[in-house]
Image (cartoon, rainbow, N blue to C red):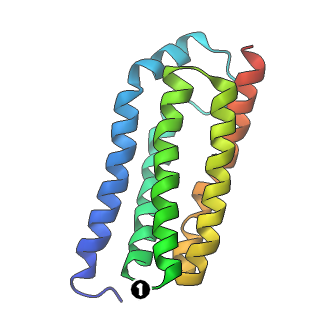
Amino acid sequence: MMKHAAWKTYALWILAVEAVGVFSGWLTREGTRLYSATVNQPPLSPPGAVFPIVWGILFALMGWSAARVYLAPPSPAMTRGLALFAVQLALNFFWSIVFFNFQWFGFAFLWLAALWALILWMIFVFRRVDRLAAWLQIPYLLWVAFAGYLNWSVWVLNR
């Protein structure tokens, strides 16, 4: 059961993480249009409309997860987990710029591999603080793995 004032913490975390996604999307809107019009895309590429829906859900789960860790009793794992969360969120934010705006597909793939590794590390640290918080990150990890397939394929198809 959520404590009376805890809902504000959850709302703040979810809104903050969603804002990162919205801002990243806004910064890459022209790059995304150019990408869609000019880049050969691999099999299994979802329609463009799928991405904001999936990312909206994932960002909400990420915010909910981070809020659970934030509300946990203070510990080194809690502090480390939130630091990893911040770093992976920054990598997530800048990946879109590297991929869509600069179209540095090879570099973006390496960036995404680093992001995937950070997410996995964060999950292991979150697990020591709050099991549900760790589980809430699994869809994100899986989606980033799928994004890795797409990124790699785009790089190969557009050399």
Q: Residue sitting at 31 percent across and 55 percent down?
A: 16
Task: Look at the image and tell me whether residue 95 can be seen.
Answer: yes
Q: Residue sitting at 33 percent across and 38 percent down?
A: 23
Q: Residue furthest right?
A: 156
Horizontal and vertical percent position of residue 149 = 73, 37
User: Hey, which quadrant is residue 9 in on the image?
Assistant: bottom left
Q: Is residue 102 above or below residue 122?
A: above
**Counting other residues with Cα less than 10 Å from the Cα at mark 1, is it few (<14), some (14-19), or many (20 or more)?**
few
Q: How many marks overall?
A: 1
Q: Residue sitting at 46 percent across and 74 percent down?
A: 79
133 left or right of 10?
A: right
Q: Residue furthest top?
A: 38
The disc labelled 1 sits on which kind of residue? Pro
Horizontal and vertical percent position of residue 117 = 68, 55
* Quadrant where the image shows the C terminus: top right
Of residues 135 and 79, which is closer to you in this image? 79
Horizontal and vertical percent position of residue 72 = 42, 84
Q: Residue sitting at 74 percent across and 31 percent down?
A: 152
Mark 1 lies on residue: 74
